[in-house]
Amino acid sequence: MLEYFALFLVFFVLLVVFYGIIVVHEIPYEMAVKNNHPQKQAIHVGGWISLFTVGAIWPFLWIWANLKYDENGKLNNSSKGEIDKLTNEVDSLKAELNTIKQQLNKES
């Protein structure tokens, strides 16, 4: 009886590991679907190819799935706007620091 339980346990563990590997390789596709990525089907196929390459391309699929696209399907280059915002904030902080320095110089 114990031999049958051990055999069942071995098959069960193998099945769970096999299913777990498939689920992990589907993560980039699920992220692409959530982000409404225009190439989500290509990411899905890449996930299956990644199974046969032992996960060699999986990190690239992860990065590809996280790229943001606008409603026209073009890559959203929001980093330019973020840099401009940060530059404006640094300039305003510099101006505020200069006014504080001037007030301290007037007091002393």
Image (cartoon, grey):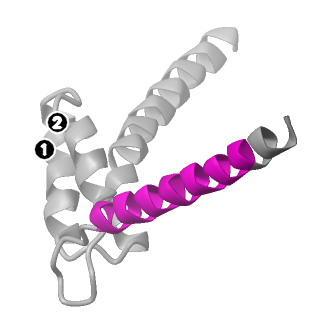
Task: Write the start and end of the magenta stretch as one range.
Answer: 78-102
Structural distance between the alpha carbons of marks 2 and 1: 8 Å
Q: What element carries label 2?
A: loop
Q: Is disc 2 surrounded by few (<14), some (14 to 19) or many (20+) residues within 10 Å?
A: some
- The front one of 79 and 39 is 79
Which residue is the site of mark 2? 57
Q: In this view, does 83 lie to the left or right of 16?
A: left
Residue at position x 23%, y 69% in the image: 40
Instruction: Determine whether label 2 and label 1 are within 8 Å by CB.
Output: yes
Assign a secondary structure to mark 1: helix
Q: For the stretch drawn in magenta, what is the main secondary structure?
A: helix
Q: Does the magenta stretch include residue 4?
A: no
Look at label 1 and name its amino acid. Answer: Ile
Provide the residue designation for mark 1. 49
Q: Residue at x 85, y 34 (%)?
A: 108
Residue 94 lies in the magenta-colored region: yes
The image shows residue 66 at horizontal and vertical percentages of 33, 57
- Looking at the image, which is closer to me, 23 or 99? 99
